[in-house]
Amino acid sequence: MSYKVIIIDDEEWTRKVIKHLGKWSELGIEVVAEASDGKYGYELISRLQPDIIITDIKMPHLNGIDLLRKIREEGNTAKVLIVSGFDDFEYSKNAVKLRANDYLLKPIKPDELNEQLERCTNELKEESRKLKEKTLDLNGFMNVHWIKEYTEFQTSLYECLRSNNQELLELKFTGFIDYIVKNEGNGVEKSLIVCIYYDLHNWLQRFIAGKGYSIQDVFEGKDTSFVFHQDSTLKDVLLFTRNLYSEALSIVTRLIKSRKTIDVKQIELFLESNYQRVVTLEQTANQFFISKEYLSKVFKEKTGTSFSDYVTALRMNKAKELVMESKVPLKEIPELVGYADLAYFYRVFKKYFGMTPGKMHENLK
């Protein structure tokens, strides 16, 4: 399992240092977004629901303490690491009172950063284990022989929602229903049926909220609760939930497509936060529930440049900043800006700037 982390700091160099020092893949963590001020940080947290948040204290628009207070009041339980200088120490102590996990003093040291990240992942794993026990072991149900199949089913549903795959979503429900009927018939305990129903319902609510809507927005006040009867079976619950998931996905897709215009600023924010990874026109279109043809057309109209040229320019300018700062080895820069192929990165860089990264570095000297 990969945990998601968001980095929020108004100092670009601090963000780069954190990204450079973290043992992300080793710890099973992925940096999914960055922000340079608290307000954008809050929007990213609301949209992406990260597992870990690394944030500065003193930032424009919304400081780290107020950001932390805001998300805690909304019930967000993400792990939070505060980045602070010595002059922020009192703020840091206040942050800990708001259930920040710990703080990192500048300058950030690799060992301290990775120690704290590992502690966060260990806590997340333990909480996940306890959650499974809570939802599936209220009466010893952790021992049911199909718990692995259920967990895989649950995870695959959320991925279907995120990728807007209606057909696969219904296939997953059908497959699991067939599995349960074949192996359990109608013999599943009522308390487990209730647990599974609310577990799946909570995942659906999480998906809808992540797209900026509420259950009320999507179903327009329609009652979405399953009415349990004496003879209710897990199959009944799963069929009801399948229809709910399918309808919600269709409505959310329609709501997003019916927006008068694409919010290009949101797309630019998405690209700014994801340029280090492979990010294609199709992936971005899926993220915003629009066709890649429509995205390509509107993006060009609004920005004056094509999607691919925009991404290239974004990566090249980030690469140039890293070259000019001279604090990151040249051979590590391609990966930091989203290029797995070193030779291809050098060709693009030379074409864009008229010189290689090494030559640019020499000119600085």
Image (cartoon, rainbow, N blue to C red):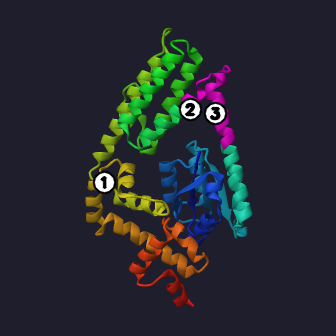
Judged from the image, the secondary structure of the residue bearing numbered disc 2 is helix
Q: Marks 2 and 1: CB-CB under 8 Å?
A: no
Residue under label 2: 151
Residue 97 at least partly seen: no
Q: Amino acid at mark 2?
A: Thr
Residue under label 1: 292
| Quadrant housing residue 148 | top right
- Where does residue 258 sit, x and y in percent of width and height? 27, 45
Residue 8 at least partly seen: yes
Q: Marks 3 and 2: CB-CB under 8 Å?
A: no
Magenta stretch contains residue 134: yes
What residue appears at the point 41 percent right and 74 percent down from the top-left corner?
A: 348
- Where does residue 118 sit, x and y in percent of width and height? 70, 52
- Where does residue 16 sit, x and y in percent of width and height? 58, 68
Where is 219 relative to 43, above or below? above
Separation (CA) of disc 2 from disc 1: 32 Å
Q: Nearer the viewer, residue 346 or 27?
A: 346
Q: Amino acid at mark 3?
A: Leu
Sequence-first tag of 3 and 2 = 3
Quadrant placement of the N terminus: top right
Where is 184 relative to 129, above or below? above
Magenta stretch contains residue 303: no
Q: Nearer the viewer, mark 3 or mark 2?
A: 2
Q: Nearer the viewer, mark 1 or mark 3?
A: 1
Where is 37 relative to 347, above or below? above
Q: Amino acid at mark 1?
A: Lys
What residue appears at the point 40 percent right and 72 percent down from the top-left corner?
A: 313
What residue appears at the point 64 percent right and 33 percent down from the top-left corner?
A: 131
Residue under label 3: 131
Sequence-first tag of 1 and 3 = 3
Quadrant placement of the C terminus: bottom right
